[in-house]
Image: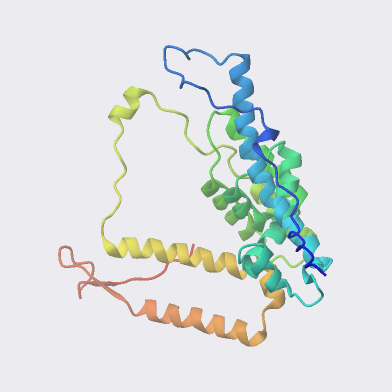
């Protein structure tokens, strides 16, 4: 009996391809002579198609988180019945770590809510900074407030950047410290967000203003550079301690170990001395270097 031909491997459903877009490359590049002035109707259509590709990529990011949650919760990863979740991520998602998969599953609802509210997906960096605010209010509240902030910047002709979101979220989250009631805590966070400035980026300066502008001085002292790093580290630790998901899974001994490490670092820093040869800052010519609480 002749050998039966081997069955071809099962193909996965194919992703979106370029055939879904009407974007085409020109035979000859446009020049200032052949393309000038406002975009015509065809050029506007082509630009819109290019923007679709960007938005599709950002949308696909949160759809990946949604898909991972479906596979995990329905245990579709098991394959023949023996494959684990970790093995599935290794084999089917090019070694995606479980922590990265968890982050995608944690944030997709917020990303979807923003896209519905805003009419377009938000950048990954914005999503990362906005997540703590959503955790203390709701995905819907965070999406609504983000959209207001985004359009306020658009109206003023300035770009909203992740750093601005991080600063606003930090102040809003700080307003909830010490508030035990969940409803009151959410209201305090939302009120602190609303109290912030709408658009904090400056308007474009004229050429004359740029010529006369003086660049702000930034200390080259390595101690100042180290203190800036310490302040960033302090902020990162504070944000990490506010992570509710981690707190729920953290064991008591782990929390104690982490608390002891933080206190040990504080004791070490309190003993650091900064010498000043040029200008005496006290009788001994030294001053304590401390990590200032923000």
Q: Which residue lies most toward the front here?
A: 1
* 248 relative position to 50: left or right: right
The N terminus, quarter of image = bottom right
Q: Is residue 265 visible?
A: yes
| Residue toward you, 48 or 27 | 27
Look at 56% across and 52% down and name the residue there.
166
Q: Is residue 188 visible?
A: no
| Residue toward you, 20 or 246 | 20
Q: Is residue 135 above or below residue 266?
A: above
Q: Is residue 19 above or below residue 218?
A: above
* 207 relative position to 283: left or right: right
Q: Is residue 145 above or below residue 232?
A: above
Q: Which residue lies most toward the bottom here?
A: 253
Look at 63% across and 37% down and name the residue there.
53
Total marks in image: 0
- Colour option used: rainbow
The quadrant in which residue 286 appears is: bottom left
The quadrant in which residue 97 appears is: bottom right
Residue 293: horizontal and vertical position, in percent?
47, 66
Residue 197: horizontal and vertical position, in percent?
58, 41
Residue 267: horizontal and vertical position, in percent?
42, 81
Residue 89: horizontal and vertical position, in percent?
67, 67
Q: Is residue 261 above or below residue 156?
A: below
* 73 relative position to 130: left or right: right
| Residue toward you, 24 or 185 | 24
The quadrant in which residue 83 appears is: bottom right
| Residue toward you, 113 or 45 | 45
């Amino acid at each position: 009996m002749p050998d039966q031909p081997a069955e071809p491997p099962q193909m996965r459903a194919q992703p979106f391809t370029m055939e879904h877009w009407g974007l085409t490359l020109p035979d000859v590049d446009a020049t200032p002579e052949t393309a000038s002035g406002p975009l015509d109707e065809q050029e506007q259509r082509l630009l819109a198609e290019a923007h679709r590709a960007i938005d599709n990529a950002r949308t696909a990011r949160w759809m990946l988180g949604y898909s991972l949650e479906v596979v995990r919760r329905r245990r579709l990863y098991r394959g023949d019945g023996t494959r684990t979740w970790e093995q599935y991520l290794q084999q089917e998602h090019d070694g995606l770590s479980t922590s990265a998969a968890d982050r995608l599953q944690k944030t997709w609802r917020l990303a979807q809510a923003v896209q519905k509210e805003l009419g377009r997906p938000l950048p990954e960096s914005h999503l990362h900074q906005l997540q703590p605010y959503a955790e203390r209010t709701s995905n819907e509240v965070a999406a609504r407030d983000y959209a207001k902030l985004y359009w306020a910047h658009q109206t003023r002709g300035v770009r909203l950047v992740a750093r601005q979101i991080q600063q606003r979220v930090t102040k809003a989250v700080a307003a909830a410290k010490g508030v035990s009631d969940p409803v009151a805590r959410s209201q305090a966070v939302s009120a602190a967000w609303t109290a912030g400035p709408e658009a904090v980026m400056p308007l474009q300066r004229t050429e004359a203003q740029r010529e006369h502008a003086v660049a702000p001085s930034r200390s080259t002292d390595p101690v100042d550079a180290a203190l800036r790093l310490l302040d960033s580290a302090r902020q990162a630790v504070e944000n990490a301690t506010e992570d509710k998901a981690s707190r729920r899974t953290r064991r008591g001994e782990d929390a104690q170990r982490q608390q002891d490490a933080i206190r040990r670092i504080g004791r070490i820093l309190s003993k650091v001395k900064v010498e000043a040869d040029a200008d005496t800052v006290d009788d001994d010519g030294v001053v304590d270097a401390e990590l200032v609480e923000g």
